[in-house]
Amino acid sequence: MQAPFGQDSFFFPPELSGQGVSWAGSGLLLPRGFRAAAAEAGLRGKRLDCALLVSDEPAESAGVFTRNLVKAAPVLLCLRRVGKFPFRALVVNSGVANACTGSEGLEAAERVAARIASLLACEPEQVLVASTGVIGQPLPVEKIERVLPQLWDSLGRERGLDFARAIMTTDTRPKEAAVWVELSGGAVAIGGVAKGAGMIHPQLATMLAFLTTDARVPARDLQTFLGEAVEPTFNSITVDGDSSTNDTVLLLANGASGVALQTDEDRRRFRAGLLAVCTSLARQIVADGEGATKRVIIRIDGAADPHQAQQVGKCIAQSLLVKTAIAGGDANWGRIVSAAGASGVVFDPERICLSLDGVTVFRMGRPVEVPPETENRIFAGPTVLIELWLGQGSASWTVYTCDLTEEYVRINAHYRS
Amino acid sequence: MQAPFGQDSFFFPPELSGQGVSWAGSGLLLPRGFRAAAAEAGLRGKRLDCALLVSDEPAESAGVFTRNLVKAAPVLLCLRRVGKFPFRALVVNSGVANACTGSEGLEAAERVAARIASLLACEPEQVLVASTGVIGQPLPVEKIERVLPQLWDSLGRERGLDFARAIMTTDTRPKEAAVWVELSGGAVAIGGVAKGAGMIHPQLATMLAFLTTDARVPARDLQTFLGEAVEPTFNSITVDGDSSTNDTVLLLANGASGVALQTDEDRRRFRAGLLAVCTSLARQIVADGEGATKRVIIRIDGAADPHQAQQVGKCIAQSLLVKTAIAGGDANWGRIVSAAGASGVVFDPERICLSLDGVTVFRMGRPVEVPPETENRIFAGPTVLIELWLGQGSASWTVYTCDLTEEYVRINAHYRS
C-alpha cells in the first residue's frame, strides 16, 4: 500500500485555496469534536476493514447517494436517516457491499448501527452505516460486532488516516484532504476521506466519501452546499462508467468550533473550502483508478451551456478507445473527436478545435500538421490535458478520468478470487 | 488470419432458416448480377485493403449510417446518393477512415467514385464509397486509383470472400453469410459481408456491412426492410461502447433473378432471409470483438416494453465490470444486477430473477445458493448466456456482446503504431 497523495498541485490545486481557504497539509485533519478508529474485522484477510467515526455532539448531516435503482442496504438505511436525525456515529466496512441481500441485509445494517448506538447511549437513528466490496454476500455482522468495542476504545482525532485506509478496496492509496477556512467568527476546518478505484462513474454521487466540519451550519444549507460541491467533483469523474449500488457522499457538521456562517462572505468561503476538499478527493480517486498510469483532465470550452459541456466531456472520458490510446501514449485525436460527436450534443464539426497537452491537433474541422517530435511529447507525461473548443457558446466544464490499461482488466477479471 | 466462421449454430441459427429460407453454406455467395474484386493498394502494408463491388445492372439501394455527429467523408457521400440514384458500384478501403478530413476528404471520396464511374460508363452518383481505419489521415487517392484497373479486370462472382478480407482492420476473420429464399416466383439469394472488431456499439448502424440480393424489391420497401433488420442485429451488439464516424450498412437489390416480391408471404420470407443474414453477421462481429475470448448472449425478459428490455440489455453489455468478470470466468452476478439497476429503466429489484448459463443465481431480490461445482461451470464455455427477468411485463429483447480482455487494451493502446 502506498502513502497518501502528497502535496502534488493536481490534488491540492493552488487556485482553490487563498481567499480565506488554506490547505491543512496532507496529514488527515479531523475537525474538532470528531474522533475515528479502524480495526481488522477479518472481512477481507488481515487488513483494516472496519472503521468508526463519532461526533462527540449531535451533528447536522447531508448526503448524496447512488442513483442506481439497486441500492445496497446501508444506502437505504442512510436515505431514511440523513438530515432527519442528529448524527452521532458512522460505521463503514470494506470487503462486503451488503447489496442485493434483501431484507436480511437491511436488518444486518440496522443491527450494526444499534450496537454502536448502545455504546454511545444515543438513538439507533443517529447512527449511519456504509459498506463497500463484493455484491450479494451477506454482511458478517458477528465479525463486525466483535471489533466494535476495540473501535470504541481506540477512538481518536489522529486516527483519520487509519479510517481512510480501512475503507479501501482495490485502492492503492488512502485518500484524504482538509482545509482551514477563515470565517468572520474564527477558523473552521473541513476534512474528508474517500475511496474509489473502480465502479466510478459520473451522473452519480460516486464511490464513498465522508466529509466533516466543525463549522456550525444550518441543516437546510448543508444539503445545498453538498449538492453544489458534488456536481463539478464527484459527479465529474469516471474510471470505468460503471455505477455502484453503494455510492455515498456524507457531509457532517457538528459546530464544535462554535463558529457559524454569519455573512455572505462566510458562506462563500465555506463553499470554496468544501469545493476544494471535494476536488482534491475526486482527483485522488481518478489518479488511483484501477490499473491507471495517467490522470486525464478533459476541459470542454465554447459550449452552449455547462450541461452540454459536461455531457461532451463525459462521453470522451468514457470512451475505451480514448482511454486505451492514452495508456499507449498514442495521440490518436480522431478517437476524441469521434467520442465528442457521439455525445448527443449538437455542434458543428467544422468549427471545433482540439488541443492535447497544449498542442493544437485539429482546428475548424481539419487536422493540424504536428512535427513528430512534438507529437511524441503528447500524452507522455503522468497528467494528460485534453482541451476541446466546441464553437457554440461560452460555457465550459472539466471532467477527470484516467487511462485504461491491461491491469484494469486483470484486477476486474479476478476481483472475487 | 483465420478462416471464416464455419457452420457453428451461433452464427447460423437453425431457427432463422426453414419456412422458405435456407443457409447457403459458409462460402460467400454473391447473388446473380453482382461481381466483386479485392487488391493490395498499400494502404496498410502488404494485404488486401481495397475492394470493389459492381452490379451489372442498376440496382435499388438502401442504407443505415452512423448517428455520430462527426461523419466521415464516405458516409456524407453515401447519404447524398443512397436511394436517390440507381446503384452500380461500391469501392471500399481499409487502413484509412477518411474521417475528420474536411472538404478535401469529400473531394477525395468523390474522385475515387468518379474514376469507377468512368470505367463503368455510368454517372458518378451511381457509385458509393466506404472507408474504415485511422481517423484524421488524408485518403491516399493515388494509391487507390492505381489498383482500380486491376480491381476492374479481376471482377468475379466468386471473389466475395476476398472482398470480405479486404475490408478487415483488426478483425481476425472475414465475416460473410448468405441465404436462399424460396419465393412464389422462384428462388432469390441474399448475401452479406461485414467488418467489425472495435468501435462497435448499439444505438448506431454499427460497423461496415454490405448486403446484396438479386430479388426485385421496390426502393420504398428496401429501406423499410433494412431498418427492421438492423434494429435486432447490428443495433443490438456492442464490443466497446464506442461509436464510429464511418458506420455504414448498405442493402443493394439488382433484380437479376427476375423474381419479385408478389405476395405477403413473399415479403415475409424475404424479410426473414434478410434478418437471418444480418443476425449471422452481427454475431460474427461480436465473436471476433477485439481481444474477445467469449461471446455473450444477454436475454432480457419480463420487461414493460421491448425498448426497455433493449436498454437494460445494452447497459449490461456495456458494463466493463460485467465484461471483465466474464473474461475471468467469474460468475460475479452482482455486477450484472448493478448494471441493470443503472440502466435508467424502472423495475422492482425485489422481483427480478437472473440465470447465468441456465443456473438461477438471483431470485426475487435474493441470492440463490449455488453449489461450487455448479458455479464453476458458469462462464466456463465459449458462449455465455445471461438471462434476466424483470417482472414488469411480457416484452423481451436480446443483445450480443463479447468479454473484455487484456488483449483489447493491447490492441487499442497501440492501434496506430
Image (tube, coloured by chain):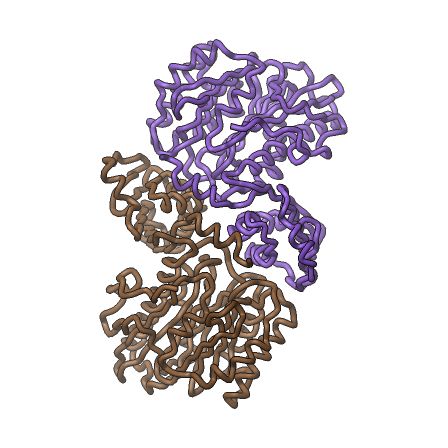
Chain colours: A brown, B purple
Left or right: A283 as drawn, with respect to B333? left
* Residue pictured at 45% horizontal, 73% vertical: A250
Quadrant for the C terminus of chain B in the image: top left
Horizontal side, residue A96 vs residue B261: left or right: left
Whole-percent x and y of residue A187?
27, 81
Q: Measured from the top left, where is residue B234 in percent x and y?
A: 57, 36
Viewer-proximal residue, B237 or B70? B237
Residue in view at x 40 percent, y 82 percent: A35
Among the 4 quarters of the image, the one containing residue A230? bottom left
Q: Nearer the viewer, residue A42 or B364?
A: A42
> How far from the left and from the top, in percent, is residue A397?
35, 55
Q: Is residue B389 visible?
A: no
Left or right: B27, with A55 as reference point: right
Q: Please, is residue A357 above or below residue A365 in the view?
A: below
Q: Image height check: is B401 above or below A61?
A: above
Residue B99: image x %, image y %? 39, 32
